[in-house]
Amino acid sequence: MRTPGRLEQTDDWDELAAWWLVEVDDPAYREEVVPLFLEVFRPRSGQVLLDLGCGDGRIGERVAAQGVRVVGVDINVELVRVASGRHPVLLKRLPDLACVRDAAVDGAYAVLALEHIDDSACFFAETARVTRAGGSLTIVINHPVYTAPRSGPVIDQTDGELLWRFGRYLSPGKSYEPAGDQTIEFRHRPIGTLLTQAAAAGWSIEAAVEQGMGSRAASRDPILAKHRDIPHLMALRWRRSSPSAETRSVTRRPGSS
């Protein structure tokens, strides 16, 4: 297994393609993640949308089936190769969208990607910059309660109730989780941080859905059944407001001074 620090390097993502293809074939991804995204997502036929962290492009394929033109963005060379057979893809490391001009698309979405992006404030600023007024941003993330460093389940030995240890929820942080024979970095931000960053970039919240362990997964494992009331996933949808002069003056592309 690689040391956690090595996983911060871009090259390591090229070695995670096989792991990710296994992850998206997991029943939990099909039964919980994708339905949650589709519940919150509100596309319109004819729109042009960015699929941020598109992976192998399978979600983009489902979105395109609704009459949407999808352009994926991902850093993993192998996954970009697979996704390019489904829709156009840009090989970029998020949140860098400097190759996309201002107000060029009708919106963007990111499924289980934001927690792997170093700069979430830049993510919201860049998606707002490239999205036309009235456009949307939809994300699905591992719930911040779940990603907080040192958080985890605790069993009450007196009655068997499953409780949740919050860990370092209130502070930004990072943790490392197994990814095949390697580990992958998860960035933690409290919900308040994400909402404030999005608002500062000009995004107005429209929907927020929190989800515990799904019934199908719970039925397969009695331990997971105890997680039904513990938030595991969160989906949010924003609408792009017209940028004010103040917002335009402070928004910068990645790498600009």
Image (cartoon, rainbow, N blue to C red):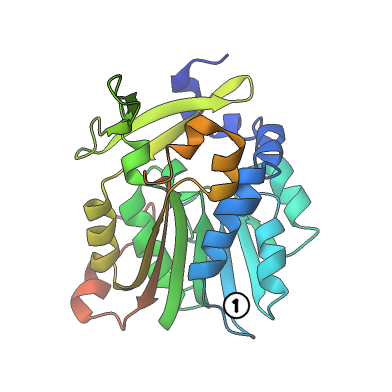
Which residue occupies 48% across, 27% down? 177
Identify the image quadrant of the C terminus: bottom left
Residue 116 visible, this angle: yes
Relative placement, left or right, of 179 versus 213 is right
Q: Residue pushed farthest front?
A: 159
Q: Looking at the picture, tell me which residue is in the foreground, 166 or 192.
A: 166
240 in relation to 9, above or below: below
Give residue 162's position: percent from left, percent from top: 35, 32
Which residue occupies 47% across, 56% down? 140
Which residue occupies 42% across, 35% down? 186
Among the 4 quarters of the image, the one containing residue 60: bottom right
Which residue occupies 76% across, 49% down? 81
Relative placement, left or right, of 170 versus 150 is left
As helix, strand or loop, the secondary structure at mark 1 comes to: strand
Residue 53 visible, this angle: no
Residue type at tag 1: Val
Q: Badge 1, how many Cα within 10 Å: few under 14, some, many 20+?
A: many
Q: How many marks?
A: 1
Q: Looking at the picture, tell me which residue is in the foreground, 110 or 163.
A: 163
Relative placement, left or right, of 133 versus 37 is left
Give residue 40's position: percent from left, percent from top: 48, 69
Give residue 53's position: percent from left, percent from top: 56, 52
